[in-house]
Image (spheres, helix red, strand yellow):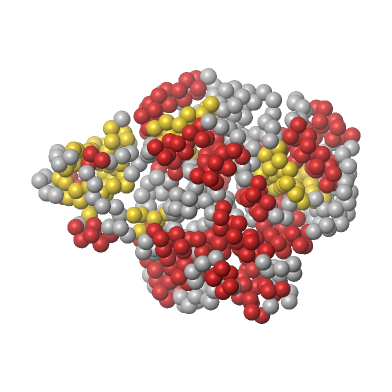
Amino acid sequence: MKLGDSIRTIKGIGEKSEELFKKLGITTVEELLAFYPREYDLFTAIQPVSSVREGEMVILEGSFASRPQMALVRNLKIISCKFRDSTGQIFVSWFNMPYLMRSLKMGVRYIIRGRIVRKNGVLQMAQPKILTKEEYVNQTGKLSPVYSLTAGLTNHAVAKAVALALKECEMESDFLPLQIRKEYDLPDRKKAVRMIHFPDSKESYARARRRLVFEEFFLFALALRQLREKKHSVVSPYCLKPQEKTKELLSSLPYSLTSGQKKAWEEICEDLRSGYVMNRLVQGDVGSGKTVLAMLSLLTVAEHGHQGAIMVPTEVLARQHYEEFHKYLEPLGIQVVLLAGSMTAAAKREAYRQIASHEADIIVGTHTLIQEKLAYADLALVVTDEQHRFGVRQREQFSEKGETPHMLVMSATPIPRTLAIILYGDLDVSVIDVLPVGRLPIKNCAVDTNYRPQAYRFMEKQVQQNHQVYIICPMVEESENSEAENVMDYTNTLREVLSPSVRVEYLHGKMKAALKNEIMESFASGEIDILVSTTVIEVGINVPSATVMMIENAERFGLAQLHQLRGRVGRGTAQSYCIFMAGNPSKETMERLRIIEGSNDGFYVAKQDLQLRGPGDLFGIRQSGDLLFALADIYQDAKELQQANEAANSFGEKDILLLCKKHERLRKKMEQYTGEEIII
């Protein structure tokens, strides 16, 4: 079996399974082995009932203190009873497992494993698995991989396929030069891939992960160097200065630019008229006013008779930008066109025609803007919003749509300067560190789950005042349950406890794009009062009337991501609030959450996040949400990022070592990574 072979070559994967794996983006053996676990299930020792805490996955041994009772709730058959040991008792419940009514015996000792949740103020164990003594003994202390799944595919099926692939596949020799592996004490790639899927200890997991994270950063740093060398002082055919229409736009805005915006705008103007291609990053906290700078830059290009385009990560954000640009620029005679994936074929064809014929001056869209069949008439400026959502290659593909166009990159991700210099190595950096006048600081509170009933009452009051609410749920269910079930279950609970007049909807990443867009647009237009969501709303929605965000199990996120999520509220003139709810309110958790509770400054929060995280603090869970990397986290793995950058820089000015025969495997890997052939 070879890495490039179809997953059908793995025993047990037939046509049906192949289709399910395809939904996860897995079609080859190589893609399967690169489908790393999202976390690990660790079987702990049996503990007393009296010691359990909310949010924990625990194993208990005891007997049933009451006969199981069955109730029908929302078409679900719920079985519940009491479980006890010598230290106390706890409620346990199962749904849609009616056969347990017959099989559970009073007086018999059982070992059960499940997550502790709080319902109606009482701790209970939800959906526990009953273990045999043998299962318990064999699994205790072991780390079992937990994969992201799609409906119809079980965790066991993915783990079995990975195990067979590791056993049968002829993995290629390591592409990282031996000298680098020795210098940074990195294990061989074959061993690292095997241990990331099936670690025999936390230590071997940490070592395997470190190797694969280093590799991701190393390839990224090399690709960035290639890009930097290619772009260094490139002469631009577009030498541009803001004209009358730009001045008209500035005077028509209902606000004045902040000092931070003015400084960034001056730097952009200097780049545009310099005679060289602009490659600039505008980094500013959520709500600092980056979009107006993009609009001014695009207008400058358009009034010189050229085209500009802005690419954003979500359709909802694309539509919001389109509407705002259209409102301000149409009176100035500028034609703005939207291009989004959910548009009809006829609407897309018309957009393509307008872009190719130069009827369109400014184009707003998602990744559809880099499709092969899309031809621009005269593309002079490309803007990418939320840079960390687009890889180096995507950014490059976008700029290739024109004749050396200027490049402007916008990011609200608060990244400490030491890391930003590495991550944005091919860009000049402008920072907006002042929020617009009139924005009220968000009021934050970090609480435990006892506060939840009070939080619900507060939300209802906000809804009565015509405000809206976000509730963020992470994936906290066991591997066999999907994030969809978790969010749906929470939504059903809310509908029961809140007034029937409160309109509650849910949103999760596994929904079809069209439905996701529909729900996000309904929320943006005020048709939904409370949106229960996973982190899919982190980027790409602007709702000024949303004043409350509650983040469940806040301890499961990095501080920088919590700050990004919090940025969805506080966008209007009303006072906004963010509730960080800790499912496991340990002393360490609450100390960490106090940092974000006490500051709305994203750069300060990111810096603290960096200092707080040790190499094993977030065992098995990626937090930053950066789609540049499959495994690496720029905060958790800051040390590896710096080391990988150092290793990439050791290759010398012209990357002579990379190109010589000795490093042919690395050259091939780089070609695969960047999608470009390296000519020796």
Q: Could you say which quadrant of the image residue 40 lies in?
A: bottom left
What residue lies at 88% left-to-right and 54% top-to-bottom?
A: 237
Q: Nearer the viewer, residue 388 or 160?
A: 388
All told, the count of numbered labels is: 0
Does 496 sit above or below residue 51?
above
Query: Would residue 35 appear left or right of 112 to someone viewing this image?
Result: right
What residue lies at 19% left-to-right and 38% top-to-bottom?
A: 89
Q: Is residue 518 visible?
A: no
Does 314 sit above or below residue 448?
below
Does 578 sit above or below residue 50?
above
Q: Position of residue 169 (x, y in %)?
A: 46, 75
Q: Could you say which quadrant of the image residue 474 lies in?
A: top left
What residue lies at 66% left-to-right and 69% top-to-bottom?
A: 671
Q: Position of residue 14 (x, y in %)?
A: 41, 68
Q: Position of residue 103 (x, y in %)?
A: 16, 50
Residue placed farthest to the front in the image?
183
Q: Position of residue 367 (x, y in %)?
A: 66, 52
Q: Is residue 141 visible?
A: yes
What residue lies at 39% left-to-right and 28% top-to-bottom?
A: 451
